Amino acid sequence: MKTHTIEVQKLKAAGNAHGLIMLKVDALVAPKANVEGLEPSSILSMTEANARVLMSLLKAQIAELDTKKPKSRHGRHG
């Protein structure tokens, strides 16, 4: 597995299609060397301000996906 360090510089937009949420971002991406003895993984970092924007974009996209889901016509049994 290739691992990377990904630093979000700017979140530009969000959208969704076919159950996927897509984010348009400006980011710095650099290969990351695996550290022996640790599970290989990529690192995503961002400022607190960008994290707050990300949270807002995700909430909006999830709400939009929820409105597209068909409502159940059957009540809960149980």
Image: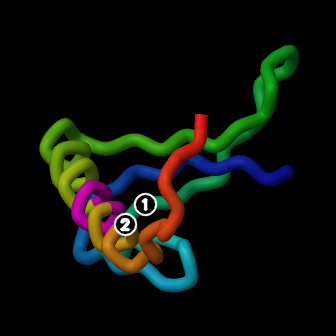
Residue 35 on image: x %, y %:
77, 24
Disc 2 element: helix
Disc sitting over residue 28 in the figure: 1
Q: Magenta residues, as a range?
A: 58-62
51 or 46, which lies in front? 51
Q: Residue furthest top?
A: 37
| Circle 2 crowding by C-alpha within 10 Å: few under 14, some 14–19, many from 20 | few
46 or 15, which lies in front? 15
Residue pointed to by mark 2: 66
Disc 1 residue type (three-letter): Leu
| Circle 1 crowding by C-alpha within 10 Å: few under 14, some 14–19, many from 20 | few
Residue 75 on image: x %, y %:
48, 54
Res 45 visible: yes
Q: Residue at x 58, y 42 (%)?
A: 77
Number of marks in the image? Answer: 2
Residue 18 on image: x %, y %:
56, 83
